[in-house]
């Protein structure tokens, strides 16, 4: 196939075509290899983009993070990147800005907060709230 | 490496290599993908997965993209269970004939279905799979409505919910019939393991999924999946609403082993009134009018009676 599947017209597609997640043979254990070391095919949705769904984006402030990984487990879009038991950041290509990560963050002040999509990350970090004295719910 | 992942805590769980990719087009804040991620990440085994038509199927396989890093079958509304049962039977037959070598590790077979596909449309097929006793796991993503087609009622929709085919208005309070007790029905099929899970109680969920994978025979998992679009709450409240559902005992978390041994796996420290659970979801907002207040009282009585029944069964071991 010389043409990219994305450039094909409707009459060029194979009916009932199988979509492959990976390029070539997979000779490694999928459950052991982190995504960055995998050979994704262009038909894998990892290569797609839903970042334009966002109205607000989560900004990560690592100063307050305790690596509890609540955000990682509850993220519906596989967008929280955690490696070696540490929270690294948010995958902005796949994040839809639902705000669950901010809601479940247990730290005081929260280490993830929603900001307007157009806010600069550095600027957002300077606007971070102080530790609040009020006890949670 | 095969078998279940050893998961001691959330930190060790977070080292899992993801097998469900982002950029699927499920709504922001959808609980389906939280459940799918928790199940796929819980095991190291290779997986053969199918999904019934529903939100999960159409949103994770928008041509030309797929979100699944494991074998996945796109199938009709009713027969995800049968498709996976067929794959399981084929695997068994080819191993017997020696065309799949003994050195190839056994995959696990998982079928996903929405509540429409499970409670209504696919029920006959599901029932057949359980009767034949295939070694598979069926996961029902129970969001109590046909969410993919615009929110029609299903037989999982609870009393009083406003759905597009049972709307609340001046003469009606919405859905009139109560939800089917699918867990008891599947347990009565003689299934070796049946459980109800919720994505917010991830540890309880992982334990049940591990047990399900270890069990030989058909396993049924009913996963509560809070639907931000049809339950009409804000996307960031998914976990909050799920917490209310499990803590108010509307979705009690329990398991039934071999159809008889019932264990309650989560007892909330503070039981929340059902009123709080209903109040968090605008699909029930008409119940707070004075003329429908009695329905909330009935809800509470029904939930209390069911909790009492579960406790009695657990105690009597029947």
Image (cartoon, grey):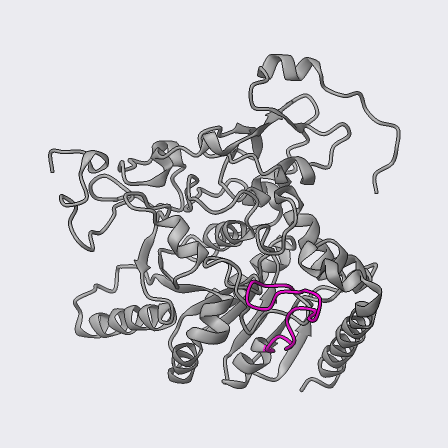
Vertical comparison of B244 with A43: above or below: below
Q: Residue furthest front?
A: B170
Q: Would residue A88 appear left or right of B275 to someone viewing this image?
A: left
Report the side of A52 relative to B269 (left or right): left
Q: Is residue B163 magenta?
A: yes
Residue sitting farthest toward the left: A2
Please state which of residues B207 and B63 is positioned toward the viewer in this rendering: B63
Chief SS of the magenta region: loop
Q: Which residue is pictured at 71% across the width and 61% down the height?
A: B284
Name the quarter where the C terminus of chain B is drawn. bottom right
Q: Is residue A133 above or below residue A32?
A: above
Query: Against A34, is B103 above or below?
Result: below
Give the number of callouts.
0
Q: Is residue B214 visible?
A: no
**Horizontal and vertical percent position of residue A101:** 62, 37
Name the residue nearer the viewer: B298 or B37: B298
Q: Which residues are magenta?
A: B162-181
Q: Is residue B29 magenta?
A: no
Pick the residue in front: B108 or B67: B67
Pinpoint residue B97: horizontal percent, then vertical percent.
17, 73
The answer to which image quadrant residue B196 occupies is: bottom right
Note whether residue B199 is visible. Answer: yes
- Give the camera-side residue of B122 and B173: B173
Please indicate whether residue B93 sits to the left or right of residue B149 in the image: left
Residue B315 horizontal/vertical position (percent): 75, 81
Quadrant of the rendered image containing residue B173: bottom right
């Amino acid at each position: 196939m010389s043409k990219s599947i994305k450039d094909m017209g409707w009459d060029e597609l194979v009916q009932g075509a199988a979509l492959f997640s990976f390029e070539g043979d997979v000779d490694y254990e999928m459950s052991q290899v982190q995504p960055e070391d995998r050979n994704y095919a262009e038909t894998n949705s990892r290569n797609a983009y839903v970042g334009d769904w966002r109205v607000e984006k989560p900004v990560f402030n690592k100063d307050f993070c305790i690596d509890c990984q609540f955000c990682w487990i509850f993220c519906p879009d596989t967008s929280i990147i955690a490696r070696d038991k540490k929270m690294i950041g948010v995958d902005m290509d796949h994040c839809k800005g639902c705000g669950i990560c901010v809601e479940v963050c247990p730290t005081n002040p929260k280490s993830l907060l929603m900001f307007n999509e157009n806010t600069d990350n550095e600027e957002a970090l300077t606007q971070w709230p102080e530790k609040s004295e009020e006890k949670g719910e | 490496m095969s078998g279940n992942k050893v998961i001691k805590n959330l930190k060790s769980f977070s080292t899992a290599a993801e097998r469900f990719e982002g950029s699927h087009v499920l709504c922001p804040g959808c609980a389906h993908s939280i459940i799918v991620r928790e199940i796929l990440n819980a095991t190291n085994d290779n997986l053969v997965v199918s999904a019934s038509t529903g939100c999960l199927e159409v949103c994770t396989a928008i041509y030309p993209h797929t979100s699944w890093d494991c074998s996945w079958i796109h199938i009709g509304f009713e027969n995800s269970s049968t498709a996976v049962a067929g794959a399981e039977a084929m695997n068994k037959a080819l191993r017997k004939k020696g065309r799949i070598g003994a050195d190839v590790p056994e995959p696990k077979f998982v079928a996903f279905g929405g509540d429409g596909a499970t409670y209504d449309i696919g029920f006959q097929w599901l029932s057949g799979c359980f009767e034949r006793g295939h070694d598979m796991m069926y996961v029902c993503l129970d969001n109590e409505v046909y969410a993919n087609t615009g929110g029609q009622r299903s037989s999982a929709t609870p009393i009083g919910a406003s759905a597009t085919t049972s709307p609340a208005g001046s003469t009606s309070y919405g859905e009139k019939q109560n939800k089917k007790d699918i867990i008891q029905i599947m347990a009565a099929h003689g299934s070796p393991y049946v459980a109800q899970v919720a994505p917010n109680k991830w540890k309880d969920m992982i334990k049940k999924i591990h047990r399900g994978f270890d069990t030989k025979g058909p396993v049924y998992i009913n996963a509560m999946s809070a639907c931000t679009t049809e339950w009409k709450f804000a996307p960031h409240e998914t976990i909050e609403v799920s917490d209310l559902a499990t803590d108010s005992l509307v979705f009690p978390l329990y398991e039934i082993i071999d159809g008889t041994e019932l264990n309650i796996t989560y007892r909330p420290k503070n039981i929340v009134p059902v009123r709080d659970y209903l109040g968090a979801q605008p699909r029930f907002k008409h119940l707070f009018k004075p003329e429908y207040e009695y329905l909330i009282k009935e809800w509470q009585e029904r939930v209390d009676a069911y909790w009492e029944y579960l406790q009695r069964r657990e105690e009597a071991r029947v």
